[in-house]
Image (cartoon, grey):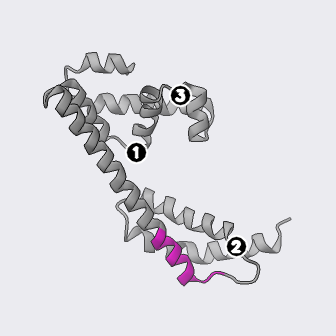
Amino acid sequence: MLSERELAFIAIHKDSYPSVFRFVRRRVESAEMAEEIAADVFRVIWQKWSDDVRPDLAYLLTVARNLVGNAYRSRDRQHALQEKLRTTAVERYGDDSENVAVQDAMARLRVQDRDILQLAYWDGLGTAEMAGVLQCSESAAKVRLHRARAALRKQLPAGIETTTEKLGV
């Protein structure tokens, strides 16, 4: 049986989720990102829940606005890191090197694919360790890694086999 707190939270979620999602969706580039942020809004609300006060829509949208800002700052830091890595590869190996081609291909991947490839090849983690970091099962980590490798292969220009072999792709 659900507690009063849980029932109240479910009611707030049911009543407010569409408005929160629309608010976030207008401010981010993808529906997937909007869904993640909208879910995070309700995670924050649940964590900060006070039995004294029921959060209103204005409060939910304030939390959403803050999370959207966090997402953009995170994205900007990720882009800056990718650019720094690419610049370093160009300085070390030249514009036409396979290292630069791999950096460019990595930059075009989805964040989730890039993350698991970096965990596997840059951080040297095994499947069990990746599963722990990603908070998923080992079999899910294997599937994610397999899919990320396939996505990377599609992004690489023809003739980069030696680099993909080094990566195990």
In the picture provided, is 140 more to the left or to the right than 87?
right
Residue underneath mark 1? 111
Q: Amino acid at mark 3?
A: Lys
Assign a secondary structure to mark 2: loop
Q: Residues within 10 Å of mark 1 (few under 14, many from 20)?
A: some
Q: Which residues are magenta?
A: 55-66
Identify the residue under disc 3.
142
Q: Earlier in the sequence, mark 3 or mark 1?
A: 1
Give the mark, 2 or 3, whose residue is nearer the N terminus: 2
Q: Is residue 95 visible?
A: yes
* Residue 49 locus on image (x, y percent): 70, 73
CB under 8 Å between discs 3 and 1: no
Compared with 3, 150 (above or below) is: above
| Element type where label 3 sits in the image | helix
For the residues labelled 3 and 1, the Cα–Cα distance comes to 17 Å
Find residue 129 and report its horizontal and vertical position in percent. Answer: 59, 30
Q: Earlier in the sequence, mark 2 or mark 1?
A: 2
Residue 49 — which label?
Answer: 2
Quadrant in which the C terminus appears:
top left
Q: Which numbered disc covers residue 60?
A: none
Q: Which amino acid type corresponds to the residue marked 2 in the rendered image?
A: Trp
Q: Residue at x 24, y 27 (%)?
A: 99
The amino acid marked with disc number 1 is Val
> Is residue 42 rendered magenta in the image?
no
Farthest right residue?
1
- Determine the secondary structure under disc 1: helix
Question: Between 162 and 38, which is closer to the camera in this rendering?
Answer: 162
Residue at (40% x, 56% y) in the render: 74
